Amino acid sequence: MENVKLFEAIEFQNIKEIIYHSAKVYAEKIAFVIKHKKEKEVSYENITYKKLLEDINKLGAALYQMGLKGKRIAIIGKNSYDWAISHLANMLGRECFCSTR
């Protein structure tokens, strides 16, 4: 069977490149949908890739200002947007994060 190239694929070295690329190319597209529930009232909030990267960078900057650069951080909680932001901020901000790990 002959290998047929169906589309051009972008090769990324790490998750940081993926996040930054997505925020650039898909800035206004929806990355997350958050469900808010207050008693019987339910609403949904759309989070764009641009907002996702902004939230990651804001938390990363706050962690850096707290003196946590290069420190180990444990993230405990339920699966949520806040947990995802915490994990990504920690991962993208780590000084030693690279593709050789």
Image: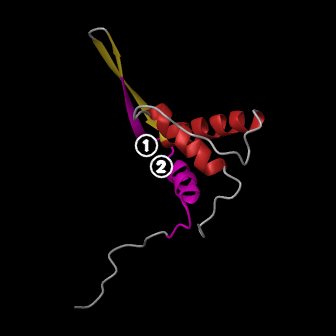
Residue 51 placement (x, y as % from top left): 54, 36
| SS for callout 2 | loop
Residue 46 within the segment the image draws in magenta = no
Front-lying residue, 18 or 62:
62
What segment carries the magenta color? 11-35
**Residue 26 badge:** 2
Tell me: residue 28, above or below residue 80: below
How packed mark 1 is, by other alpha carbons closer than 10 Å (few <14, some 14-19, many 20 or more), is: some
Query: In terms of image quadrants, where is residue 79?
Result: top left
Classify residue 1 as left or right of residue 22: left
Q: Can residue 19 be seen in this view?
A: yes
Which residue appears at 49% of the width and 32% of the height?
82
Q: Which residue of the protein is positioned furthest toward the left in this rendering?
A: 1
Q: Are marks 1 and 2 in contact (CB under 8 Å)?
A: yes
Q: Can residue 50 be seen in this view?
A: no
**Residue 51 badge:** none
Which residue appears at 58% of the width and 66% of the height?
101
| SS for callout 1 | loop
Front-lying residue, 46 or 65:
65
- Tell me which amino acid carries mark 1: Lys
Residue 30 placement (x, y as % from top left): 41, 40
Residue 28 within the segment the image draws in magenta = yes
Residue 28 placement (x, y as % from top left): 48, 41
- Tell me which amino acid carries mark 2: Tyr
Which residue appears at 55% of the width and 38% of the height?
86
Query: In terms of image quadrants, where is residue 81?
Result: top left
Quadrant position of the N terminus in the picture: bottom left
Front-lying residue, 78 or 14:
78
Which residue appears at 66% of the width and 39% of the height?
60
**Residue 29 badge:** 1
Front-lying residue, 91 or 14:
91
